[in-house]
Amino acid sequence: MQVAPSAAAWRGGLAIRRTSERSPRRTVRRKCIMFHASSRILLLGKAPAVPSPMAPVPPFRTATPPTPVAGPDSPRRRPEEQRSFAQNKRDPMNSQKSWVATIGMRPNQIAVVLFCAFLNMLDGYDVLVMGFAMPYLPEGFASNAQKGYLVSAALAGMAVGAIGLARFADVYGRRKVLLIGLAVNTIGLATSALSTNFETLLLTRFVTGIAIGTISVVIIVLGQESAPANRRSIALGVVMIGYPLGTMLAGFAGAGLLTWVGGAWQGMFWIGAAFGAVSLVVTAVFLRESDEFLQRKATGEPTRHGATIAETRLLGQTLRTRTILLAGGYSMLTAAYYFVGTWTPQLIKNASGDAGSGAMAGIMIGLGAVIGGTLFGAVGLKFAGARIAAVTSLVAAVAIAVFAVTLRGPIALTMAAVLGAAVFAALTGYTATSTAVYPVLARAKGYGVMMGVGRAGAILSPIVAGYASSVLTPRSMYLAVIVPLTIAALVALVLMRVRPPSEPEPATQTSRAAVAD
């Protein structure tokens, strides 16, 4: 039975619950509280007001000392708690969370970036496959001049795909356009293997180039958008590495693949078609649409006072300057890169008479390109892409000057590697800048135009070099490359002052027709 607390207990500010059951501990506690209440009466001179009898009786609480945290092997922890502690410590989810926090990217984001790098590697293989198949073409299939057109057909198709078709990734989505590009690429490679004359093979190579140009733009944009903002330089570097890695693997493995397929030139195209079909299935089953594209497509571009401020027209008032700068600077770099990459073995052979030295210099340039893409992924965490492009373009100009003076020996090979690394890092810097200075709904077509114009430089530079080789020495031709590299550096310095587009609060929906213009 519960009894109301005594007046002295109320005057002390504490409530006592009396029960019929008496215990020595409860009795001692009650006496201590009564003594404390009496002491307060003597000190204060009067007792505090007694609360109303109708007021609820507060429970009696005692302070409990904090319980020390027991370790996994503490005797205070019960056996089942020790097992639970050990299981949590070995939980793979906990280790995965710490690993994700260290890398800064989730596993699905890393998978998308690596898959884009793989597709870029296949693009590098598809571009060079014709070069390895030409020596095995039957007699009378194509003349030497016609073989040159077979090589250039894919590059011309890449320019068309990058400029004309990649822009639809800003309208219909990255994933849909990538699926179409992979399907066309697979069909183009298969029909190339089935070609029976020069005209058919020329057409199929052009169609394949259109698909390659479309794919190469979409994977760059998709790889960056799949990564967090503070990890996009690493993602771009990984994706860009795929192209020179694919060309190097094609160069080293071309002879082995031809031996495996019995020396038939069609085998190279069938292998590429098989990889394309696998990539198409993986994309259709596993690849998701870019979250950033879906968000911007759903909310529309930012507006101010009802008027669109982030124009999607590349030659409009807002984007005209950056479009011209990017296309001009990138074309200078691609002209230098493809000239050095395609003509170095021949020029070194003409200057020294040693074909092995020329081949080794070409391999060092390709190896340097892989190193340059890797370094950009690390340096890009701290510096903007335009600044990296400006510095590496100047480094490439110095490297090619030293290479032109030496042409042979360890110093020349070292400069060849530095040249490949610097030029490819500059190309990657321009790529990072193009995807940063355009709004989301103009990003694919902006990079596509830059890449398409750059392909024009890649097509023209080997042709111009062929005419120049009859009137200039190899040293003079290499020294002439300093001019486009310097122009690319100056353009990158101007691009450093271009501000990225703001992506503020969502506003009105941008029409599909305006984006497609």
Image (spheres, rainbow, N blue to C red):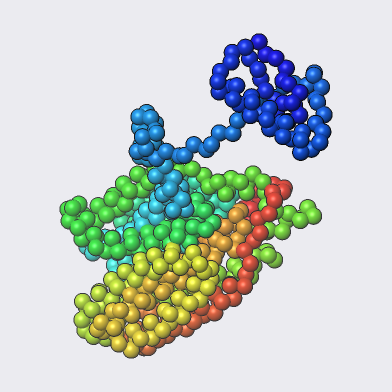
Q: Nearer the viewer, residue 179 or 22?
A: 22
Task: Reply above or below: 463 against 449.
Answer: below
Asked if residue 301 lies left or right of residue 491, the reply is right
Residue 32 location, quadrant: top right
Task: Reply above or below: 289 against 51.
Answer: below
Q: What residue is shown at x 41% (from left), y 84% (from top)?
A: 398
**Where residue 119 sits: x, y (%)?**
39, 53
Residue 248 location, quadrant: bottom left
Count every numbered label the image shows and give the total: 0
**Where residue 413 sits: x, y (%)?**
28, 79
Is residue 333 visible in this depiction of the protein?
Answer: yes
Asked if residue 25 lies left or right of residue 401, the reply is right
Q: What residue is shown at x 49% (from left), y 46% (from top)?
A: 175
Is residue 150 visible in this depiction of the protein?
Answer: no
Q: Quadrant of the image for the N terminus?
A: top right
Task: Reply above or below: 25 against 134.
Answer: above
Q: Nearer the viewer, residue 325 or 233?
A: 233
Q: Quadrant of the image for the C terminus?
A: bottom right
Asked if residue 186 lies left or right of residue 503, the reply is left
Asked if residue 276 lies left or right of residue 4, the reply is left
Q: Nearer the viewer, residue 62 or 492?
A: 62
**Where residue 160 sits: x, y (%)?**
49, 60
**Where residue 490 sits: x, y (%)?**
54, 79
Residue found farthest to the front: 42
Q: Nearer the viewer, residue 89 or 484?
A: 89
Q: What residue is shown at x 29% (from left), y 73% (from top)?
A: 364
Q: What residue is shown at x 80% (from left), y 18% (from top)?
A: 54
